[in-house]
Image (cartoon, helix red, strand yellow):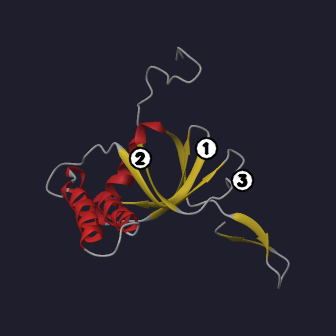
Amino acid sequence: MVIKEKNELPDNAPPKDWFLQFLVNMANKNRFELGITLNVGGILISGTLAGVKQYFADFGSDFAASFDAGKGSEEVKATFKKIGDECVCVSNAEPAESPSYIHLKDARFLDAQGNSIQGNRGVWWRGRLSEVQGFVLGTLNKPVTAPASGRPGTFPG
């Protein structure tokens, strides 16, 4: 196995993880949600895997909220929903697709040690599958001490 440059993939490594593509396909076609943490360029992105239809519909609603209520905001919501509805990657009649993008809701960003980035809050995130270097199922949580028992516990941080 020959690596040409420090950050380049070996010649035989696929650009996208087939298993992660499978999970994205499930989310795209079945409105399936799953906690997941991605490693992208040394940053950890932790959130809930969401399908492309849900991403565009809910992102559109959030985006439309910045407009004055009324016709303008409703048009924005409808436009984003239509984009999600028309994505070819959600057609159940076609053979399995090879998605290029992954969508997370309530995404949070953490450094390589798992420390939350300042001012971090859950947001909608869209990224290229080819940029994901690794993943784990589940979202990252901060350890805390439960006051009643004094034993460690977790909570979404």
Q: Which callout, 2 or 3, points at the residue further toward the start of the chain?
A: 2
Q: Identify the residue under disc 2.
A: 19
Q: Nearer the viewer, residue 85 or 3?
A: 85
Q: Secondary structure at mark 1?
A: strand
Circle 2: residue type: Phe
Q: Secondary structure at mark 2?
A: helix
User: Badge 3: how crowded within 10 Å, few (<14), some, or many (20+)?
Assistant: some
Number of marks present in the image shown: 3
Residue ranking furthest to the right: 150
Q: Identify the residue under disc 1.
A: 43
Horizontally, residue 96 falls left or right of residue 52, namely left
Determine the residue positioned at 58% across, 61% down: 139
Q: Identify the residue under disc 3.
A: 115
* Cα distance between the residues tagged 2 and 3: 27 Å
User: Badge 1: how crowded within 10 Å, few (<14), some, or many (20+)?
Assistant: some
**Are circles 2 and 3 on residues that touch, CB within 8 Å?**
no
Of the two numbered discs 1 and 2 in the rendering, the one whose residue sits closer to the viewer: 1
User: Badge 2: how crowded within 10 Å, few (<14), some, or many (20+)?
Assistant: few
Q: Which callout, 1 or 2, points at the residue further toward the start of the chain?
A: 2
Residue ranking furthest to the bottom: 148
Tell me if residue 17 can be seen. no
Circle 3: residue type: Asn
Q: Which callout, 3 or 1, points at the residue further toward the start of the chain?
A: 1
Q: Where does the C terminus fall, quadrant-wise?
A: bottom right
